[in-house]
Amino acid sequence: AQSVTQPDIHITVSEGASLELRCNYSYGATPYLFWYVQSPGQGLQLLLKYFSGDTLVQGIKGFEAEFKRSQSSFNLRKPSVHWSDAAEYFCAVHTNAGKSTFGDGTTLTVKP
Amino acid sequence: DAGVIQSPRHEVTEMGQEVTLRCKPISGHDYLFWYRQTMMRGLELLIYFNNNVPIDDSGMPEDRFSAKMPNASFSTLKIQPSEPRDSAVYFCASNPDRNSPLHFGNGTRLTVT
């Protein structure tokens, strides 16, 4: 069965600093990988996705993620964090059967 | 498009009562998912449908939970009888095909007292 691990429950960064959120997955076949963001009181919104091809994918709001098959990782990065990026971030793996499994999420706090 | 629409946004009920949560997926989306989110267990997939047919209900906690999708534009998740441990945010999501990202509704916050 597929699984997703987000090792960091909570991360705090200063505004303007760089950010990296970690994600490791377990899935027997080639995975479809996603990052979503959730603001308080709202549903999850897609940030970016990886299906195949270039292992560095660009998303909305200046985010990017790199797929590393050898490490079973799909880490999310942003070079300069803005206060509005404070939210909860979820990594997900999507199987060929159409089922998505989510990590437990990482809460990002941005210090002024 | 209005996105995935869930109702109600908030529901407060007493233990033992029946609760019905509603979802309208995005038009043209063939897959519909029900998730439950809690602090303790995170996001859990309860059940999902393809073309109105339930495909995987292995995440449904117990017989008190049931879900239906009578047509392509409407689904319900029912809890009968409800218990305090059912308190959570319930999300509905849809996508056009099995490989596409999910589009989430804003959720229903259920409180069972």
Image: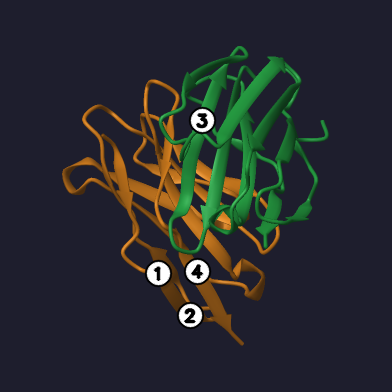
Chain colours: A orange, B green
Residue at mark 2 shares a chain with residue at mark 4? yes
Q: Residues within 10 Å of mark 2 (few under 14, many from 20)?
A: some
Q: Position of residue A106 (x, y in %)?
A: 45, 65
* Residue A13 numbered tag: 2
Q: Is residue B8 above or below residue B33?
A: below
The disc labelled 4 sits on which kind of residue? Thr
Residue under label 1:
A9
Distance between the Cα atoms at labels 4 and 1?
A: 6 Å
Return the chain for callout 1.
A
Residue B26: which quarter of the image?
top right
Asked if the residue at tag 3 contacts the one at tag 2, i.e. Cβ–Cβ closer than 8 Å, the answer is no
Q: Nearer the viewer, mark 3 or mark 4?
A: 3
Q: Position of residue A38 (x, y in %)?
A: 60, 57
Q: Position of residue A100 (x, y in %)?
A: 44, 35
Q: With B39 as the anchor, is B93 left or right in this view?
A: right
SS for callout 4: strand
Along the line of sight, which residue is nearer the eye, B34 or B106? B34
Residue under label 3:
B47
The tag earlier along the polypeptide, 2 or 4, is: 2
